[in-house]
Image: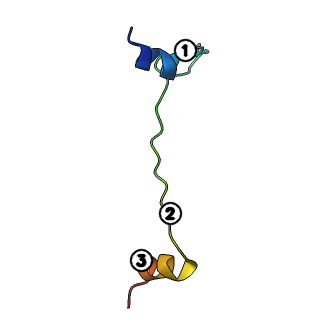
Amino acid sequence: MRDETKCLRAGYTPGNAEPRVLPIAQSTAYVYDSAEEVGQYLMPL
């Protein structure tokens, strides 16, 4: 097993009726300079 895989999966022991492989949740974060800039992306005119 590669080190990257061990970092993700180490210490996980599935219980009864739980997934055998630990699910990986992907997320993303963005940085904006101001709330107005966010508004431009969410509600363009």
Of label 1 and label 3, which has the lower sequence position? 1
Q: CA distance from mark 2 to mark 1?
A: 31 Å
N-terminal label among 2 and 1: 1
Q: Residue furthest bottom?
A: 45
Picture residue at 50% right of the left edge, 20% below the top? 7
Q: For residue 41, which quarter of the picture?
A: bottom left
Tag 2: amino acid: Val
Residue holding disc 1:
10
SS state under label 3: helix
What's the amino acid at mark 1? Ala
The picture places residue 24, in percent across and down from the top left corner, at 46, 32
Residue drawn at the location 43% of the way across and 14% of the way down: 3
Which labelled disc corresponds to residue 22?
none
In the rendered structure, find residue 31 and report the number of the disc placed on it: 2
At horizontal 61% and vertical 15% (from top left) the residue drawn is 15
Number of residue marks: 3
Mark in front: 3 vs 2 = 2
Judge by depth and name the residue closer to the eye, 32 or 24. Answer: 32
Few, some or many C-alpha atoms within 10 Å of disc 3 (few <14, some 14-19, many ≥20)? few
In the displayed structure, 20 sits above or below 31; it is above
Residue 6: where, in percent of width, then height? 47, 14
The image quadrant that residue 4 belongs to is: top left
45 up-or-down from 10: above or below = below
Q: Which residue is mark 3?
A: 41
Residue flagged by tag 3: what amino acid is it? Tyr
Quadrant containing the C terminus is bottom left
Could you tell me how far apart the alpha carbons at marks 1 and 3 are, in whole angstroms? Answer: 39 Å
Q: Give the CA distance from mark 3 to mark 2.
A: 13 Å
